[in-house]
């Protein structure tokens, strides 16, 4: 859901920062970032111990959430809004998708027997994002929708981490893994709080507003 919200909101941002026909570049960027992230997971999967998977998944979702406001600053206030810098737009925009690709592929790698359920949940999240986009865009604006995507990914990830950390769940959970490191959970709580504050601030003050260019 978060990834689709990010991708769809990106089309709006590209349409006002670059020429409007570059809005569809978001699809290519999403495929590129998700594909490279998943490919990296495939290459390095034998180096990751199974008991480390929940921690790695939470780490990559935290980085994904962190990359969203950084992306907004770079796109709106650092990279010049000019098609001569199109490659910088492409690479910068692909970074959040890269970490999302790692996180999603790690989830599929961790639970191969549940792959049908994971695909179903994945599609439900994507469908929900398409339904949520228009009302959120009308109410919050594209910048806050992107920040909402960060909030939506880190919140459930933390809940899952806390559930997996309970003694009863460790005996019967699908991953059969030990407690996720406290420092990782603490980092997630800090990122969640910072994302919520940034979203609230941007909603009322438009702190990270991206201005349309003359073209």
Image (cartoon, rainbow, N blue to C red):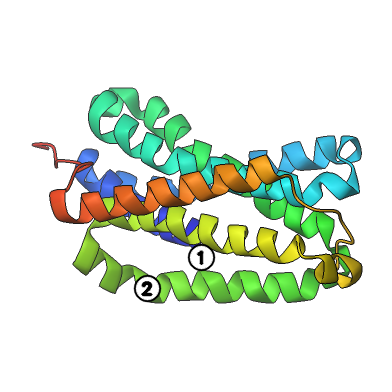
Q: Nearer the viewer, residue 81 or 3?
A: 3
Above or below, 116 relative to 91: below
Residue placed most toward the observer, 25 or 166: 166
Say which mark, if any, is on residue 132.
2
Estimate the spatial distance between the alpha carbons at disc 1 and disc 2, rounded to whole Å: 9 Å
Of the two numbered discs 1 and 2 on the same chain, state the one appearing first in sequence: 1
Name the residue nearer the viewer: 78 or 156: 156
Mark 2 and mark 1 in contact (Cβ < 8 Å)? Answer: yes
Q: Quadrant of the C terminus?
A: top left
**In percent of the image, x 75 and y 50: which residue is there?**
180
- Badge count: 2
Spot occupied by residue 77 in the image (x, y as percentages of width and height): 24, 29
Q: Quadrant of residue 169?
A: bottom right
Query: In the displayed structure, would residue 80 be above or below residue 195?
Result: above
Q: Secondary structure at mark 1?
A: loop
Please give left or right for residue 136 compared with residue 57 in the image. left
**Residue drawn at (87%, 56%) of the image:** 177
Q: Is residue 58 visible?
A: yes
The residue indicated by pointer 1 is: 1
Q: Position of residue 117 (x, y in %)?
A: 75, 76
Q: Position of residue 31 (x, y in %)?
A: 57, 48
């Amino acid at each position: 859901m978060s990834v689709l919200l990010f991708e769809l909101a990106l089309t709006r941002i590209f349409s006002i920062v670059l020429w409007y026909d570059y809005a569809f570049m978001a699809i290519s960027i999403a495929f590129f970032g998700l594909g490279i992230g998943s490919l990296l997971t495939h290459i390095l999967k034998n180096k990751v111990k199974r008991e480390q998977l929940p921690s790695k998944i939470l780490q990559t979702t935290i980085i994904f959430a962190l990359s969203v406001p950084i992306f907004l600053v770079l796109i709106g206030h650092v990279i010049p809004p000019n098609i001569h810098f199109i490659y910088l737009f492409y690479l910068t925009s692909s970074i959040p998708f890269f970490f999302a690709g790692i996180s999603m592929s790690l989830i599929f790698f961790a639970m191969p027997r549940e792959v049908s359920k994971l695909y179903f949940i994945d599609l439900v999240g994507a469908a929900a994002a398409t339904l949520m986009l228009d009302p959120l865009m009308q109410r919050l604006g594209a910048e806050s929708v992107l920040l909402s995507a960060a909030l939506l990914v880190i919140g459930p990830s933390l809940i899952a981490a806390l559930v997996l950390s309970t003694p009863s769940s460790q005996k019967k959970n699908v991953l059969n893994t030990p407690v996720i490191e406290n420092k990782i959970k603490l980092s997630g709580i800090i990122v969640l709080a910072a994302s919520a504050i940034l979203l609230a601030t941007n909603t009322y003050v438009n702190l990270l507003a991206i201005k349309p260019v003359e073209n």
